[in-house]
């Protein structure tokens, strides 16, 4: 019994050390990217979706992204918007992309500048499906950027690269910033990204 306790204690101590060390390495990257102010004059702006409350009410985080997107598009009249996100929650009646698009048009954005990516359920699918929409238009070397919440910028940037984007701009939503809860979530999701990257490398 004493040996079991000893080995268990040693294991938990090692695990704690790994978690603390990896957090100390990863979290500064999240904070660094969250604190940057991006303003990319892009051809296409991917507006990453977020939680929907009930049938069609945008969460506070999604609303922040929508507000920033409308401001950006009004300041960059040549940019084409690609709202991203499907309709996949139990009570949801309208896709994330549809909710974003409705808000944009209500703010004076020409519907002709909006391309819906309304099939995705993950950030990976946001980028993959949006790439197909852009490719179908046949533009030569378009400048692409994505818009998301500050705490999500670093992770989304990593995912974009994993999805094959060679160069992508970033636009940070005007939001409430990064808190401990969001940092913890980003840290643990990073392990999921690492596993996906390893699988993709050896696929």
Image: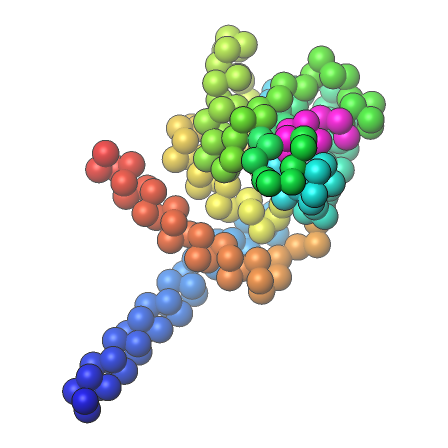
- Residue plotted at (27% across, 40% down): 199
- Residue plotted at (69% across, 45% down): 53
**Numbered-mark total:** 0
Q: Nearer the viewer, residue 38 or 95?
A: 95
> For residue 161, what is the image quadrant?
top left
Residue 56 in the image: state x and y as whole percent.
Answer: 72, 37
Is residue 167 visible in the rendered structure shown here?
Answer: no
Q: Residue furthest top?
A: 138
- Residue plotted at (39% across, 46% down): 193
Q: Nearer the viewer, residue 106 or 53?
A: 53
Relative to residue 89, is residue 97 depicted above or below?
Answer: above
Relative to residue 80, is residue 16 depicted above or below?
Answer: below
Question: Could you tell whether 137 is left or right of 19 in the image?
Answer: right
Which is the main secondary structure of the residues drawn in magenta? helix
Is residue 134 visible in the rendered structure shown here?
Answer: yes
Q: Residue furthest front?
A: 90
Residue 144 in the image: state x and y as whole percent.
Answer: 55, 25
Residue 147 in the image: state x and y as whole percent.
Answer: 62, 36
- Residue plotted at (61% across, 36% down): 49
Question: Is residue 98 highlighted in magenta?
Answer: yes
Q: Quadrant of the C terminus?
A: top left
Q: Residue furthest bottom?
A: 2
Q: Which residues are magenta?
A: 95-103
> For residue 48, what is the image quadrant?
top right
Residue 20 in the image: state x and y as whole percent.
Answer: 40, 69
Q: Nearer the viewer, residue 91 or 171?
A: 91
Q: Quadrant of the N terminus?
A: bottom left
Relative to residue 9, is residue 193 depicted above or below?
Answer: above
Question: Is residue 14 highlighted in magenta?
Answer: no
């Amino acid at each position: 019994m004493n040996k079991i306790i000893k080995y268990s204690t040693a294991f938990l101590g090692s695990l704690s050390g790994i978690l603390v060390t990896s957090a100390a390495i990863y979290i500064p990257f999240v904070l660094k990217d969250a604190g940057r102010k991006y303003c990319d004059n892009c051809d296409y702006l991917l507006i990453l979706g977020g939680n929907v409350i009930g049938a069609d009410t945008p969460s506070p985080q999604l609303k922040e992204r929508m507000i920033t997107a409308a401001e950006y598009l009004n300041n960059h009249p040549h940019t084409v918007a690609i709202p991203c996100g499907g309709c996949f929650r139990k009570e949801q009646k309208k896709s994330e992309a549809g909710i974003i698009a409705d808000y944009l048009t209500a703010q004076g954005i020409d519907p002709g500048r909006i391309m819906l990516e309304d099939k995705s359920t993950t950030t990976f699918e946001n980028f993959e499906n949006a790439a197909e929409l852009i490719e179908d238009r046949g533009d030569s070397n378009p400048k692409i950027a994505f818009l998301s919440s500050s705490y999500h910028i670093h992770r989304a940037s990593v995912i974009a690269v994993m999805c094959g984007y060679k160069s992508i701009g970033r636009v940070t939503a005007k939001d409430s910033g990064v808190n401990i809860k969001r940092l913890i979530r980003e840290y643990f999701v990073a392990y999921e990204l690492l596993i996906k990257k390893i699988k993709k490398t050896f696929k």
